Amino acid sequence: MRLTILFAVSLLGASSALAQQAPRVDPKDLKAPPKLPEMAAPSGLQGMIDQVSEENILVLDLSSGGRVRIIMRPDVAPKHIERIRTLVREGFYDGTVFHRVIDGFMAQGGDPTATGTGGSKLEDLKAEFNDLPHVRGAVAMARAQSEDSANSQFYIVLMPTLKLDRNYTVWGRVVDGMKWVDGIEKGEPPDNPTRIVKASIAADKVPPPDFAALKPAATPIPAGALNFPPPTSGPAPGASGPQPPR
């Protein structure tokens, strides 16, 4: 009786061992794997500033006390980068203020009227939505209700806001000087708005200003100048940037 039980247990163990083997496959059922696309060469735009062409680095000298360097991404938003370069080299952004700055969200600027409704004389841009996320330091174009209404205004993300992804054109990211972005005066509008003293492209080798001699903007934005309508699920009509969560 004992030998019978041991023999049965031995058979059970052998069956278990067989069950763990890989299933048999008929060679006729095997198919060649699909041909995968070849990987492109590294773009060099991985946040390592020494690998990026200086033509693709935007420099903002802020009255909050220092220089901000932003890597621009012409590989995903070529028309927007072309617009930024054009406006920067025309001196368009020099002296403009950050007119709408929401703590824990974003800092918006690039409007010469400081009202949230202004822009350049150039035509509005067609959207170039992409997969770049709204992480801290991301830079994107502000717009009104129409997806193709971006012109000159942009915003810098202070804290991740991923719900805006693929709804606004992200075209760059701050890689140096984020502390000066954090120091931008908060408010809608701010009492003493931070201004862009000088915007330049790194390739042009513009020297920084004497930050110690800078003074706050002398002409605060009038209260109620922006006059944004109540928030909606999307960008509100007439607003020139993303609506903040309330």
Image (cartoon, rainbow, N blue to C red):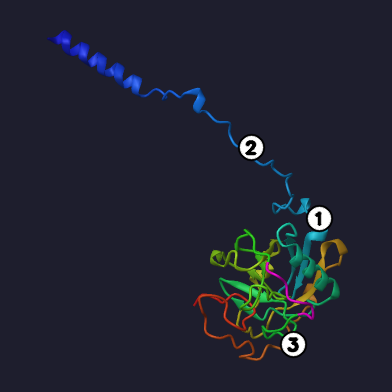
Lower sequence index among marks 2 and 1: 2
Nearer-the-camera pick, 39 or 226: 39
What is the distance, in whole Å, between disc 2 and disc 1 at their CAs? 33 Å
Nearer-the-camera pick, 222 or 134: 134
Q: Look at discs 3 and 1 and give the one toward the viewer.
A: 1
Magenta part of the chain: 120-127
Q: Which residue lies furthest to the front in this view?
A: 28
In the image: residue 24, left or right of residue 17:
right
Determine the image quadrant of residue 171.
bottom right
> Which SS class for mark 1?
loop
- Amino acid carrying mark 2 in the image: Lys
Determine the image quadrant of residue 79.
bottom right
Lower sequence index among marks 3 and 1: 1
Q: Where is residue 55 in the image (x, y as percent from the top left)?
A: 82, 60
Please say if 179 is above or below 191.
Answer: above
- What residue is disc 2 on? 35
Q: Residue 53 carries which label?
A: 1
CA neighbours of label 2 inside 10 A, class few (<14), some (14 to 19), many (20+): few
Look at the magenta stretch and give its main secondary structure. Answer: loop
Q: Position of residue 211 (x, y in %)?
A: 78, 73
- Amino acid carrying mark 1 in the image: Ser
Q: Residue 226 carries which label?
A: none
> Which SS class for mark 2?
loop
Q: In which quarter of the image is the N terminus?
A: top left
- Amino acid carrying mark 3 in the image: Ala
The residue that appears at 57% across and 74% down in the rendered structure is 103
Q: Look at discs 2 and 1 and give the one toward the viewer.
A: 2
Lower sequence index among marks 2 and 3: 2
Q: Which mark is residue 218?
A: 3
In the image: residue 64, left or right of residue 13:
right
In the image: residue 22, left or right of residue 76:
left
Q: Which residue lies furthest to the left in this view?
A: 1
